[in-house]
Amino acid sequence: MNSSAPELVTKTAGGAQPSTVVALSQVSKQYPGVRALRDVSLDLRRGEVHALIGENGAGKSTLIRVLSGDVAPDAGGVLIDGTPVAFDSPLDARRHGIVTIFQELMIVPEFSVAENIFLGNEPRAFGCLYLRSEAERRTRQVLETLVKGSGMRPAQRAGDLSTAQKQLVEIARALVFRASVIIMDEPTAALSEGEAASLRRLILRLRSEGVAILFVSHRLDEVMEIADRVTVLRGGEHIATLDAKSITRTDELIGLMIGRPITELFPPRNDKIGEVVLRAAGLTRAGAFEDVSFTVRAGEVVGFAGLVGAGRTETMRGLFGAEQLDRGQLAKRGIALDVRSPRDAIAAGIAYLPEDRKEQGLVLSMSGIENIAMASLDDYCIAGVLSWRSLRAIARAAAQQLQFRGQLEAPAATASGGNQQKLVIAKWALTGADILIFDEPTRGIDVGAKAEVYRLIHQLASEGAAIIVVSSELPELINLCHRIYTMSGGRIRDEVAQSDFSEHRILEGAFAAHLGAVSGTSAETRP
Amino acid sequence: MMGISDSTSPIAPAIDARFKPVSFLRRHSREIGLPLIVVLMTMVFSVSSDVFLSAPNFRNIGVSAAALAAVSFGQTFAILTAGLDLSVGSTVALVSIVASLMMRSYGIPAGLLAALATGAAVGLVNGVVITRFKVFPFIATLAMMSVVSGMALSLSGGVAVTGVPAAFGDLAYQLVLGIPVPVLMAAAVLVTAFLVLRYTRLGRRIYAVGGNEEAARLSGIQVGRIKVAAYVMSGVCASVGSIILTARVASGQPSLGATLPLESVAAVVLGGISLFGGRGSIVGVAFGVLFISILSNGLNLMNVPSYTQMMLVGAALILAVALDQTFGGGRAGRRS
């Protein structure tokens, strides 16, 4: 069990706690040019859920890779039951009872569920015959203890399973290995809210069986819901290990993760709000979003909150013409728009900065300059012939204003996440758009770059642009926006004015569709 | 302009300009590597054969490389969009027949125009099938290879079209400033292709579509039109290749260009164009063509049978891609 008083352990000598299963002791790991981990210690106790949080680049994945035997630390080591061990491979760690479930699930799609669970560990007769019935029998057993009604059959083809079910296969595999420690890297990131909730229940069940669980999550509400202790990393260093009960607000965790109070990241809001620029009425695409109506004014930053799968991105893509709308009208400054393709949207002064920069925002193989010019290439062409000189000059000026730090002539792939996002912003700013849709604008970029993105959004707004921000990070929306719409199940559930902003109110809207279906799951909307 | 304000804050001095030899070599390993191999190969052949290093032989190499060059430059457009054009060989055959028939009846200019139009038409069909009907380029152009080849054979009745004006046949052997006309034609295609790819909106959009189709689409680029244009370019270039070959044999041949699909893809890939699209330079392709042509010329002079040469060209293609995957950071394979 946990110690009752809030504790702030900065250095835990491994093996000091009697119930410690595995500990990292003063581990350091250096990559060329990066100090990924510096003197980090951590202990996992029998029957605890331990959350590991931190910004990107904080060292979470390196820590996991050390614990799972994937990389060897430069200094320090892993202790199991107080004894130092040196893993020479992930398999070795697994033999010691540490099983890691990575984000990319290790599932062979053409194999059955049972074959996947016993992969590399097949029940055999005479050392070579695969005992299919034995594997399937034991699989059925594990699946029944794991989750009743998972809907999985041992002989089913694993490729047909949902992501959540594939995760169950991995967890079942861990149990077959008699794991004492299960490490999960962002297990709920790819799940729907219902699936995530049942995974959380499963994690708690595993805890009661005495398994130690280390899980990485960016969803702080989830961390506070199920973790017993929380370890915060920043810049490769151990910042704190806290008793989860001592934390009352996610802001505290964010403050620890970024090293300063969260409000300092955000510029003041623009106060010159003008006329309604964009009016959407009854936007509908069957199966994705329904009857979505909203307005955005000049100079206003309007947030869209909701869970993954709530239909926010789909709505924005529909509005931008990237996907067809079934119904609905768009009007800009009172004049109806007919947007059938991204090209039409751009002509109407709409810009969409997609949530996935690498897959949708940039051509990674092309230079920064060309990416910046991509949506406004016509401006540098006379009769189809390109003027590299004017293109370079304009792209350079834009990059300088955005404080792009990187090589503009080099492929965009070489820039960091934050600088890539600046390329995307520069690209759209140059189209002269006055309606800008930012979809998860700060996903995967570090704190410094986040602050700069917020500043740029503020700057665009104060110049009179109408801005929509889709984000899954509540603090971001609450501190950046003038108004927030919440979506759930493809519909707008709530419209919240700035004076009414609270995590509670917004989460209520975000869970609206789920609350209707599953009554009494109030655990998800914490007061 | 609505956009970024001009409240610039002081910027750290640009670090773009710094030259880093190691990363430069790494990034440009292909651009430097292949020319180096071509030079080395030339040296080896010069030593092993006393005929190799002579102006007549170089003209010979040039003339035999010219058709492959024109076709490969066209193939580059298709592959840059992450596509492929396997119909180039039969396009060459069909163009050869059409051009010969037209020339025989209406003279050389009409024949040349018909040749370019035929190539463009085949490319247009390829492009429309690929973009409008969403058939994979591999299948679409493989099928078109059969269709177009059938057209060439039925138009000609399966035999050569003779009676081509003599002046046209002479074209293949005329020299301008000591350079054979076919070489000049290939060079003209190279320069045009280079300019189009580097200095036109179309060219940059071809790179964008090949590099990341979804990002290009979301940037307002009409992806379908760009792809169609790329296949039309491929068809037109193939018809230039066909004009060169037809002039050399002074007749329309329904079986011309059978080896061109493989050889052009080989030249393009050897030249460093990524099969996944969006990466590589047409200058590299020119060296890819030189590599294949000098290799086969040198092997001829060393009396290596042509069947053996076919094996060597195939092996060189596999070797080039394998080396690239292993050492070159997988330029042809993984997306970074």
Image (cartoon, coloured by chain):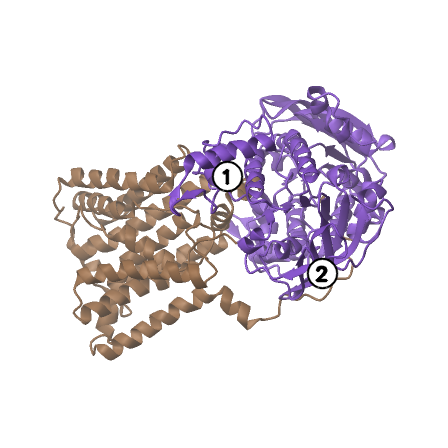
Amino acid at the residue labelled 1 = Gln
Q: Which residue is mark 2?
A: A25
Chain shaded purple: A
Classify mark 2: helix, strand or loop: strand
Q: Which residue is mark 1?
A: B222
Q: Marks 2 and 1, how far apart in space?
A: 56 Å
Classify mark 1: helix, strand or loop: loop
Q: Position of residue B252 (x, y in %)?
A: 17, 48
Amino acid at the residue labelled 2 = Ser
Front residue of A164 and A271: A164
Q: Position of residue A339 (x, y in %)?
A: 60, 29
Judging from the image, mark 1 belongs to the subunit labelled: B
Q: Position of residue B169 (x, y in %)?
A: 18, 56
Residue at 73% x, 55% y is A42
Q: Is residue A276 visible?
A: no
Residue at 43% x, 61% y is B326
Q: Do badges 2 and 1 share one subunit?
A: no
